[in-house]
């Protein structure tokens, strides 16, 4: 990963974290007052919002690569 990519990734991660925090806070602000609650909230947010989107992106990339190989 280039330094520029790493910097961009960190910026995007911070932005995602801010969005997920606001969402978690709106669902259950009390949960975010303990380390255990924060861990649960992070896990829930990752499973509900982040992982599916990453999986979809990677699946589309894999399908695109397979289609490209079939055309050659």
Image (cartoon, grey):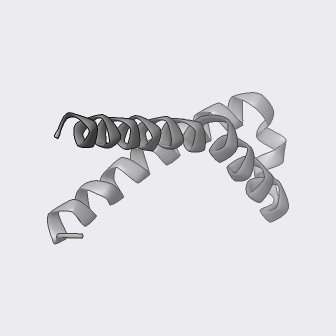
Question: Which quadrant of the rendered structure holds the N terminus?
Answer: bottom left
**Image location of residue 58, percent across then percent down:** 43, 44
**Image location of residue 25, percent across then percent down:** 69, 36
Question: Which quadrant of the rendered structure holds the C terminus?
Answer: top left
**Image location of residue 48, percent across then percent down:** 68, 36
> Quick one: 14 or 47, which is closer to the camera?
47
Q: Residue at x 42, y 52 (%)?
A: 13
User: Would you identify the image quadrant in which residue 24 lies?
Assistant: top right
Q: Residue at x 32, y 56 (%)?
A: 9
> Quick one: 22 or 52, which is closer to the camera?
52
Q: Residue at x 40, y 44 (%)?
A: 15
Q: Is residue 13 above or below residue 3?
A: above
Query: Which residue is the extreme one toward the top?
Result: 26
Left/right placement of residue 51 relative to residue 16 reads right
Left/right placement of residue 39 relative to residue 59 reads right
> Quick one: 1 or 31, which is closer to the camera?
1
**Image location of residue 32, percent across then percent down:** 76, 49
Q: Is residue 47 above or below residue 28?
A: below
Left/right placement of residue 42 relative to residue 58 reads right
Q: Residue at x 17, y 70 (%)?
A: 2
Q: Is residue 9 above or below residue 57?
A: below
């Amino acid at each position: 990963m280039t330094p520029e990519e790493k910097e961009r990734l960190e910026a995007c991660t911070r932005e995602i974290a801010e969005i997920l925090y606001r969402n978690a806070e709106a669902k259950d602000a009390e949960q975010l007052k303990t380390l255990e609650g924060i861990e649960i909230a992070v896990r829930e947010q990752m499973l509900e919002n982040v992982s599916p989107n990453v999986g979809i992106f990677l699946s589309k990339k894999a399908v695109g690569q397979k289609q490209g190989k079939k055309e050659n």
